[in-house]
Amino acid sequence: MLTVSRQSNIPPVEAGPYEAVCYSVVDIGTHSSQWGKKTIRNRQVVLTWEIPSQRIDVEDKQNPGQTKNLPRAASRSYTSSLDPKSNLRKHLVSWRTQDFTPEEEKGFDLRDLLGVPCLLNIIHKKKQDGTIKAVVDNVMHLRTKKKFTTENPLVYYDIEENGTEIPSNIPKWIVEQIMSSEEWVVLMDAGDAPQEGGDDNMEPQVLKDEDIPF
């Protein structure tokens, strides 16, 4: 089971439902994990939402010595699958309030999620070291006529489409996942030079992978 985490002195987002907007869809490639005695290979994607009501001051790299106030970020990694048992499908169905048609099952473009609001349910779980982590437990449809505009620029990255050109505002913990994927190894063997990516201002506060790999 692949769990993404990083030490941080920033307290986790409080548990509860939040209005949120998806602003980042990142393909982190294929990873292997142990499930009992079996080795499971899964293609993974990280979705990230901003929570307008929860704010944080971060360093403004364009203006040294100054800070800027941004919404907190909430991320979750999923196996890239629309299998009926997959968490990605369950959350997308809850978000869309409708199941996928046979035609959509052949290929759903995750780019369509960018800029779409939702009701994000966050819960707290205790880690083995006793600290608390915030987890995206569900993504639900948001009944509102309010117009949402993301404060963060929309981010989309697909290894096949973008190769080593990783957007600079993808946080380092996600970049590390991309660079440890099978696809990235193939790119490096092909002689492609990696581009710089990774924004220290992006906070990995809500991190959770699939409970069961499919």
Image (cartoon, rainbow, N blue to C red):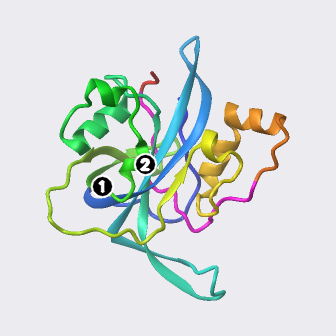
**142 sits left or right of 180 in the view:** left
Along the polypeptide, which appears first: circle 2 or circle 1? 1
Q: Main secondary structure of the magenta part?
A: loop
User: Quick check: is 206 in the magenta stretch?
Assistant: yes
Look at discs 2 and 1 and give the one toward the viewer: 2
Which quadrant of the structure image shows residue 104?
top left
User: Can you say whether 12 is above or below 47 in the image?
Assistant: below
Is residue 92 or residue 60 the one in the foreground? 92
- Which residue, given by chain and number where applicable, does mark 2 sit on? 111
Q: Position of residue 28 (x, y in %)?
A: 58, 41
Residue lying farthest to the top in this orientation: 37
Q: Total of numbered circles in the picture? A: 2
Q: Position of residue 168 (x, y in %)?
A: 64, 63
Q: Position of residue 153 (x, y in %)?
A: 48, 67
Q: Are marks 2 and 1 in contact (CB under 8 Å)?
A: no
**9 sits left or right of 134 in the view:** right
Residue lying farthest to the front in this orientation: 103
Which quadrant of the structure image shows residue 90?
top left
Q: Considering the numbered disc 1 on the image, is that residue within a helix, a strand or a loop?
A: loop
**Amino acid identity at mark 2:** Arg
Identity of the residue drawn at 42% across and 25% down: 212
User: Can you say whether 182 is above or below 37 in the image?
Assistant: below
Identity of the residue drawn at 34% across and 27% down: 105
User: Quick check: is 21 in the magenta stretch?
Assistant: no
Identity of the residue drawn at 30% across and 39% down: 92
Q: Which residues are magenta?
A: 195-211
- Which residue, given by chain and number where applicable, does mark 1 sit on? 15
Is residue 183 or residue 4 the one in the foreground? 183
Label 2 Cα neighbours within 10 Å, binned few <14 / some 14-19 / many ≥20: some
